[in-house]
Image (tube, rainbow, N blue to C red):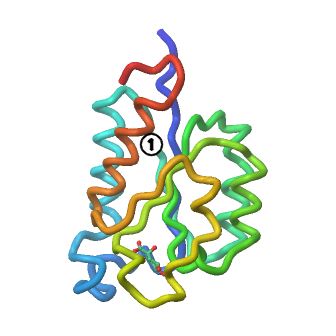
Amino acid sequence: MSLSPLIWVLHGPNLNRLGAREPEIYGATTLEQINQMVASRAKALGMDADCFQSNHEGALIERVHQATSASVKFMVINPAGLTHTSVALRDAMASVAIPFVEVHLSNVHRREPFRHHSYFSDLAEAVICGLGPQGYLAAIEFAAQRIPQHRG
Ligand code: DQA
């Protein structure tokens, strides 16, 4: 029996505060709840999902670098505030050349102008924003379709 394809879900700074953080924007769901939803949807589709959150740009970059040796097939990333600032994390994503979907809980395009630019979107297979936690599940469903030789 072949191993289930591995997906990594990366969460950027301050997303550990979901549930408590600006609930009128980000909702009441905690990161732990999102990670549980992601893991169970991935499992139902015959994949394994590992979730990682850090408030440190360098830790996220190191994690991305490890994706190749971990044989990660697909990534889902919410770079959070780093979306709008981090050339370095963007370069890390480009360096591993693993297809990914960029997810944002909020609709960044109806928020402040500084949130309208992303350093990731032109590298991403797709960008999902404004669906709340559902966006992560949509990304997982997409990954199941997108991974070669995987029928989900
Ligand atoms: C976010 C949107 C970003 O602009 C913000 O800095 C975040 C979260 C979102 O999920 O809506 O931290 O990525």
Q: Nearer the viewer, residue 15 or 103?
A: 103
Within 10 Å of the Cα at label 1, are there few (<14), some (14-19), or many (20+) other Cα atoms? many
The quarter of the image holding the C terminus is top left
Residue placed farthest to the top in the image?
1
Residue 142, horizontal then vertical, whole percent = 40, 39
Residue 110, horizontal then vertical, whole percent = 36, 82
Tag count: 1
Residue drawn 35% across and 44% down? Answer: 39
Residue drawn 60% across and 38% down? Answer: 72
In-image side of 14 versus 41 (left or right): right
Residue 53, horizontal then vertical, whole percent = 51, 65
Q: Which residue is mark 1?
A: 49
Residue 134, horizontal then vertical, whole percent = 27, 56
Vertical position of residue 1 compared to residue 119: above or below: above
Image-quarter location of ligand 1 = bottom left
Q: Nearer the viewer, residue 41 or 94?
A: 94
Q: Nearer the viewer, residue 18 or 117?
A: 117
Looking at numbered disc 1 in the image, what kind of residue is underneath it? Answer: Ala
Residue drawn 25% across and 84% down? Answer: 23
Residue drawn 45% across and 21% down? Answer: 150
Q: Quadrant of residue 129?
A: bottom left
